[in-house]
Amino acid sequence: MMNKKTFHNNIKKVMIWPNTGKSGMAHAIRQTAEVIRSLGAEVVLAEQALETGIDPAGFQVYPQQKAMIESDFIVVLGGDGTILAMAQYAAPYHIPLLGVNLGHVGFMSELEFPELSLIKRVFAGEYGIDERMMLDVEVVRGEEIIFCAMSLNEAIIKTGSIFHITKLDILCDNEPICTLHGDGAIIATPTGSTAYSLSAGGPVIEPSAENISMVPICPRAGQAKTFIFSPRREITVVPQFFNGVPIFVSCDGRKGFQLEDGDKIRIRRAPFHTRLLRVKGNSFYSILNEKLTVGRS
């Protein structure tokens, strides 16, 4: 395992990771690069960033893994989805992320795009690092692990049909907890508690709690129970198949993995954290109230 990144006021290279599917992103990369260069650092891009149409002249362009390893921290241009996409790759290398919101609400982003100049606070040592727990998600078929992923927000186990319900057995440390009848279940981190889980009626959990929540999606009447588990627990979800309805597991909104009869989804706290750079000093609750107000406007 690599040592955690520390800056010691000697930042040499900064990676920019853009949402390659968003229009105008090449311009956003150039503006961000100007700020970083003005602070005395070189700018690194992963090869995927070239999909935005950015001219690579003046940038150090590497395959994604090398780009991360070469960099002191990563500026993520986009919304929460872009941060989620990078988190799974950056966490094992302990590389901090600074989110710059070009999306909608942006719960995890620290800056709005007009606030780019505040990147200077990282260079000045005027920052904090918010460590967010992640989940390891595995699908076990027989004795074999056939799917594994790491997620910052949640794992969603859900039917593939809007017209049929699913039935899920939920276990904690192999002890049966409940059987859910409904559209599915959300197994979330505290970070994920303000995402789909919140929309499904789940609680808001502050990040430092590091609990794991299980929130049913549209449960049958009388079954609307949310469970909050210790981070030391292992949650197992066993789908029960009937009526030929497909069931999928999806992590952080990525493409779903289709399950088969007899599969078990095993979920536990991951050994890595996502490290989010904070330069504005806002508390979790002030950010929450601000973003929820924006979301209602």
Image (cartoon, grey):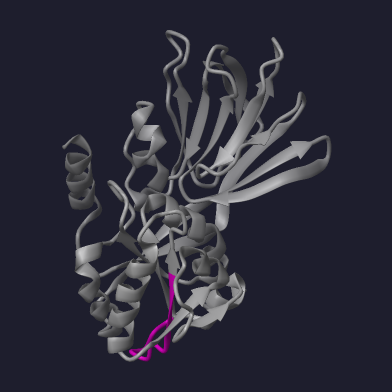
Q: Quadrant of the C terminus?
A: top left
Q: Nearer the viewer, residue 16 or 185?
A: 16
Q: Which residues are magenta?
A: 6-16
Can residue 79 be spotted in the picture?
Answer: yes
Residue 20 horizontal/vertical position (percent)? 47, 59
- Residue 9 forms part of the magenta stretch: yes
Can residue 2 be spotted in the picture?
Answer: no
Q: Residue at x 30, y 74 (%)?
A: 31
Q: Nearer the viewer, residue 116 or 98?
A: 116
Q: Is residue 34 above or below residue 29?
A: below
Residue 232 horizontal/vertical position (percent)? 54, 47
Secondary structure predominantly adopted by residues drawn in magenta = loop
Q: Is residue 28 above or below residue 206?
A: below
- Residue 74 forms part of the magenta stretch: no
Residue 167 horizontal/vertical position (percent)? 61, 16
Q: Is residue 176 above or below residue 188?
A: above
